[in-house]
Amino acid sequence: MDYTLHRSKFLKMDLSNLSFAAIDFETASRHPDSACSIGMVLVKSGKIIDEALFLIKPPSELFEFSYIHGLTWDDVKTSPSFNDLWPDILKFISRGSFIAAHNASFDKRVLHYCLKRYNLEIPDISFLCTVSLARKNLNIHPANLRSVADHLALELNHHEALSDARASAQIVLEVIKRQQSDTNLI
């Protein structure tokens, strides 16, 4: 099943009452089930109304990406596993009609692999990629999160999961703002 929310379908939604969750995973290693942190932001009617950050104890002590996000095994070894956090994560993301993420294929892959590891059901929720929005709707190139945040003057502590999720939400909100502005010109 394809869980991708295509940009064209997103742009046809009633953007004024839109609710969505933006997420960002950080992983400990190259293994897609090695989530060590998740940041989540909930947006309703154009405003960020809730945020959450969880450290996650991955299934292995292997940490290859500490140099990127700064997290180590010592930071997460007493944190709950993904399995333990899933009810809270699901409750949070289910409050939105879709999930936005920068390079959504990565976050979707991490989510799906973590769910598979613990034999949990994959929820029927679509992902919207803010890389695609930045490129095609905002004409920002390159469209990596640092470049997009700089272009839009967004605060960003890159590779801190909550900061990245917040930036993803703000990219969607910027597209909505510009879309509504263009509509008002007609």
Image (spheres, rainbow, N blue to C red):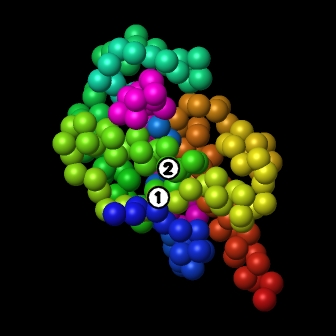
Mark 2 and mark 1 lie on one chain; the one further toward the N terminus is 2
Which residue extends farthest top? 74
Residue 34, horizontal then vertical, whole percent: 38, 29
Residue at 71% of width from left, 64% of height from top? 136
Q: Is residue 151 visible?
A: yes
Instruction: Tell me whether the residue at label 2 lies in contact with that at label 1, contact meaning CB atoms closer than 8 angstroms.
Output: yes
Residue 106, horizontal then vertical, whole percent: 49, 44
Residue 136 or residue 163, whichever sits in front: 136
Which residue extends farthest left? 119
Residue at 54% of width from left, 44% of height from top? 165
Question: In the picture, which quadrant includes the C terminus?
Answer: bottom right
Answer with the quarter of the image where residue 62 lies.
top left
Query: Crowding near pointer 1: few (<14 within 10 Å), some, many (20+)?
Result: many
Look at the picture and state if 1 lies above or below 65: below
Residue 45 or residue 81, whichever sits in front: 81
**Magenta part of the chain:** 26-53
Look at the picture and state if 156 lies above or below 28: below
Residue 30 shown in magenta: yes
Residue 59, horizontal then vertical, whole percent: 29, 23
Under mark 1, the amino acid is Phe
Q: Which residue is mark 2?
A: 105
- Is the magenta region chiefly helix, strand or loop? strand
Q: Which residue is mark 1?
A: 127
Under mark 2, the amino acid is Ser
Secondary structure under badge 2? Answer: helix
Q: Nearer the viewer, mark 2 or mark 1?
A: 2
